Image (cartoon, rainbow, N blue to C red):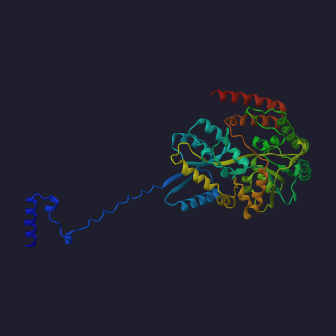
């Protein structure tokens, strides 16, 4: 009834011309309902898909195991974000595989290889990504300077140096208690140990191999190119270096004739060679019973006391140009070259890392092998990484063979090699 009375009253008021608001019955307070504000729906955060980085290398045995351990550490630290997968490629096929697959976008995001093919891949295009954009001063200071130099081509950085290899003096401690510091000491010791009739030699190394001869060549101040990468095979310094080699062979008589790698290993393991010039790859061939030491190559009395300066090969880790995950790939490369990773590669992989700080580590610094090759790298010279270097090997090898077989004088043989390399380089530059 109450509701009916209110309706009648409202009709009467409206008839009297009062405002409609006055005619509208007021809603009882008990019947009002508050409208709750709608809860805002937060959009679901999109989860970034895990990025896969593929890394190619040619390591085997302990080197492979050490690299895989470092990669596994990275994967655990970046689970769900980045996953690195490694693939071991046979060394003999590695360079050709990179050349054939990477420019077509069919290769990896990262690969590890020495610097000798760097210039050729860069000139070919779409193979290796330049890295200066990613690098800061702290990263540049991480590495031994000459190893970083090996990763630089025409002023641009194209890789992070991972490890290096160079030759040093390896000696039998039973025959050579203290290694020689100078070439004069080397010859004097070697003469005492040499007995050709018995097949004993004071020194043995692959002196006919131009790679090994480079230690003498560079020690005399020679080289294969000038600052503009024009060939200089017949320079006076190069001629002197070959004449010094002939003196060791003919006059001093301290070297075996035509030494092959197998002969050098056999002589050293049989106690018939007191000293060899060789690299870390040779250590795995030394018999277990041989107590050996490693030292830097001697200085050259004949070159005013300058050190022998072997070539250094530097294995770098490169980001491929077609990779769709360049930034992530670069972060992986940075991780693999960090000091903790370098320690694993050094102590477990038996490599010589390019990371400078790792040699301050207590375990690494007391390792005689790592210390010796680290000392030697101070005077080593990075092998040229320009495409012109591929033109040098064959003519230089031919020249060394002619000289050692007495078919030519050092000057004449190197003149001929110079002519051939200059012609080949000119042809390369016309393309």
| In the displayed structure image, the side of residue 327 where residue 355 appears, left or right | right
| In the displayed structure image, the side of residue 106 where residue 270 appears, left or right | right
> In the figure, 8 relative to 106: above or below?
below
User: Where does the N terminus fall, quadrant-wise?
Assistant: bottom left
Q: Nearer the viewer, residue 374 or 181?
A: 374
Residue 120: x, y in percent?
63, 37
Q: Quadrant of residue 67?
A: bottom right
Q: Quadrant of residue 339?
A: bottom right
| In the displayed structure image, the side of residue 275 where residue 40 appears, left or right | left
Q: Nearer the viewer, residue 406 or 105?
A: 105
Residue 25: x, y in percent?
14, 65
> In the figure, 120 relative to 110: above or below?
above
> In the figure, 294 relative to 245: above or below?
below
Residue 395: x, y in percent?
74, 33
Q: Quadrant of residue 357?
A: bottom right
Q: Which residue corresponds to the image point at 51% horizontal and 40% vertical from the top-left?
A: 104
Q: Which residue corresponds to the image point at 33% horizontal and 63% vertical from the top-left?
A: 39
Q: Which residue corresponds to the image point at 51% horizontal and 61% vertical from the top-left?
A: 79
User: Where does the C terminus fall, quadrant-wise?
Assistant: top right
Residue 405 appears anywhere in the view: no
Picture mark count: 0
| In the displayed structure image, the side of residue 328 where residue 136 appears, left or right | right
Residue 219 appears anywhere in the view: yes
Residue 392: x, y in percent?
72, 35
């Amino acid at each position: 009834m109450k509701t009916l009375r209110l309706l009648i009253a409202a009709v009467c008021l409206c008839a009297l011309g009062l405002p409609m608001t006055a005619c509208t019955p007021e809603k009882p307070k008990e019947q009002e309902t508050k409208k709750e504000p709608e809860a805002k729906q937060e959009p679901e955060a999109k989860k970034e898909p895990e990025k896969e980085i593929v890394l190619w290398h040619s390591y085997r045995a302990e080197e492979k195991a050490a690299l895989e351990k470092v990669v596994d550490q990275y994967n655990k630290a970046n689970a769900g974000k980045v996953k690195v997968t490694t693939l071991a490629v046979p060394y003999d096929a590695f360079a050709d595989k990179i050349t054939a697959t990477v420019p077509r976008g069919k290769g990896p995001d990262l690969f590890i290889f020495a610097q000798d093919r760097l210039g050729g891949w860069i000139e070919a295009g779409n193979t290796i990504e330049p890295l200066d954009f990613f690098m800061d001063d702290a990263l540049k200071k991480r590495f031994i300077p000459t190893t970083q130099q090996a990763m630089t081509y025409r002023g641009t950085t194209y890789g992070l140096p991972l490890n290096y290899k160079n030759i040093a003096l390896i000696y039998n401690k039973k025959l050579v208690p203290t290694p020689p510091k100078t070439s004069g000491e080397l010859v004097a010791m070697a003469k005492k140990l040499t007995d050709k009739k018995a097949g004993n030699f004071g020194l043995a190394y692959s002196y006919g191999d131009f790679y090994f001869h480079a230690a003498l060549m560079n020690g005399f101040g020679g080289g294969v190119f000038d600052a503009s990468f024009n060939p200089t095979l017949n320079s006076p310094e190069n001629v002197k270096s070959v004449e010094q080699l002939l003196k060791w062979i003919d006059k001093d008589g301290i070297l075996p004739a035509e030494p092959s790698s197998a002969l050098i290993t056999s002589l050293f393991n049989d106690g018939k060679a007191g000293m060899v010039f060789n690299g870390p790859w040779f250590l795995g061939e030394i018999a277990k019973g041989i107590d050996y030491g490693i030292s830097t190559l001697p200085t050259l009395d004949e070159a005013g006391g300058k050190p022998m300066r072997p070539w250094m090969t530097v294995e770098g880790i490169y980001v491929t140009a077609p990779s769709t995950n360049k930034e992530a790939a670069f972060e992986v490369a940075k991780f693999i070259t960090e000091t903790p990773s370098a320690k694993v590669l050094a102590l477990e992989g038996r490599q010589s890392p390019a990371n400078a700080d790792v040699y301050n580590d207590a375990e690494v610094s007391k390792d005689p092998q790592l210390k010796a090759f680290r000392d030697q790298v101070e005077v080593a010279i990075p092998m040229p990484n320009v495409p012109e270097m591929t033109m040098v090997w064959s003519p230089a090898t031919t020249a060394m063979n002619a000289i050692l077989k007495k078919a030519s004088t050092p000057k004449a043989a190197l003149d001929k090699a110079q002519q051939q390399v200059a012609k080949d380089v000119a042809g390369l530059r016309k393309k």
